[in-house]
Image (spheres, rainbow, N blue to C red):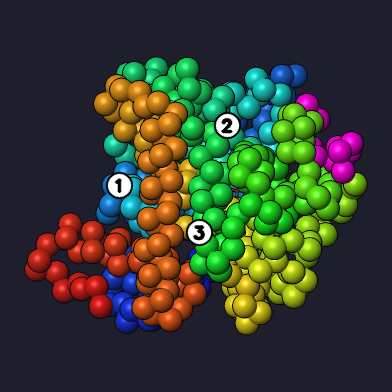
Amino acid sequence: MLEHSHHYFNQAADILALDGKMREILLRPNRVVKVAIVEEDDDGHLMHYTAYRVQHNAARGPFKGGLRFHPSMDEDHAAALASLMSWKTAVVDVPFGGGKGGINCNPREMSRFETERVTRSFVEQTKEIIGPTIDIPAPDVNTNSDVMAWIMDEYSKHCGFSPGVVTGKPVHLFGSEGREEATGRGVMYALDEALKSMGKPLKGTTVAIQGFGNVGSHAARLLAEQGALIVAVADHLGGVKKDDGLDIPALFEYAQEHRTVTGFPGGDSIENTEIIGWDAEALIPAALEDAITADNADEVRAKIIVEAANSPSTPEADEILLKRDVLVVPDILANAGGVTVSYFEWTQNIQRYRWEYEQVIQELEKFMRRAYKNVAKVAGERSCNLRTAAYLLAIQRVGQAVLSRRSIHEDIKLT
Ligand code: NAD
């Protein structure tokens, strides 16, 4: 996975003729932490897991990025995702660097109490390297506001009351209004901007979505509210389709109860592998990485792909999609709504002040549409695609911050 993020970085760095030393500084993570988690399960047996936190670059502010609980989590994943966060925070221009981490466990097979114990153990072992001004985790795959509440509680036990140590907390426990839906809402703005660039309205646009977790479900709900037709949805177990649009509030409720979209009575069943090639105007991969590869990129029928997940397309797939004139809104732009509202949450925590929901979504819309327009402008000026443009913008912003923080005696420049 790291290879993929390096590929996109190097592509943009070549266009910029980025200085060799600067290239090395920006490619290398500042810190890589690996800890063993050994806790008893509910039956008294020992659980062994490995947890990772990679802190990529903090030139623009404290490290910021999600915490993922998934069996595939490893150092390579954490490093790749951490670097994506450095570029993402720069693209959307929030004052953070990039970090990411997680535990190679499967919470679907763990009790709630076991998940809590593992989370608290992670904090116990990383408390020196996280904190409101150091590194601020947030929810990602298989982590949610409950996990963030445990992190805040455990960290505060050791370091004093610190709501700003994590974002994505419950609203009643120093979370922000609008954070849970923020990534999905940002995806909606990104799709709207992409459609606008093609002279098309959101209303009536058909959309297929892979993943119905936090990001996918909220994107579906908000898009449907704006009149888009969600014609197919898939998760890790299967999928469901309805040509004139699924009833998303009903699907939302069904998925909450059954923890899957499969079997939803308001549509027909499909295989989850069918979703990538679904006949819809827009495709939103909102599950895991490498969903679109050289093997299935030719099957894509959508004209727009909004990368709600991190790294859902491999570089080989990206090439194929580019040749086929599919407009790809890259992850570091498309899913930046989450970190944007995380920034608002952190700001509220530090100021001990609360924003209303309306203020949050108004500001989020401003940040997302501005970021999209800035990226599209660079793409126009450089005659490149949106992904390369987003990397060009991000590398310059992070690079400038790196330069301004180093001694003028050093022989390092941007280009
Ligand atoms: P989540 O755990 O809430 O949901 C993940 C979804 O993906 C689930 O519906 C799961 O069933 C589905 N899935 C897993 N494997 C699948 C497969 N093979 N086929 C189809 N569906 C599959 O996770 P999330 O928070 O919604 O995150 C989804 C993606 O968005 C991740 O790439 C994450 O890094 C990214 N992201 C999340 C946030 C956030 O705020 N949560 C912010 C930015 C980016």
The reply to whether callout 3 and callout 1 are in contact (CB within 8 Å) is no
Q: Which residues are magenta?
A: 257-267
Q: Which residue is mark 1?
A: 95
* Mark 3 element type: helix
Residue 266 within the segment the image draws in magenta: yes
What predominant SS class does the magenta segment belong to? loop
Q: Which residue is mark 2?
A: 144
* Mark 2 element type: loop
Local packing at callout 3 (Cα closer than 10 Å; few below 14, some 14-19, many 20+) is: many
The reply to whether callout 2 and callout 3 are in contact (CB within 8 Å) is no
Q: Is mark 2 within 8 Å of ligand 1?
A: yes
Q: Which residue is mark 3?
A: 193
Q: Nearer the viewer, mark 2 or mark 3?
A: 3
Residue at the location (88% across, 52% down)?
Answer: 270
Please report whichever mark, 3 or 1, sits nearer to the chain's N-terminal start. 1
Q: Nearer the viewer, mark 3 or mark 1?
A: 3
Residue at the location (33% across, 28% down)?
Answer: 348
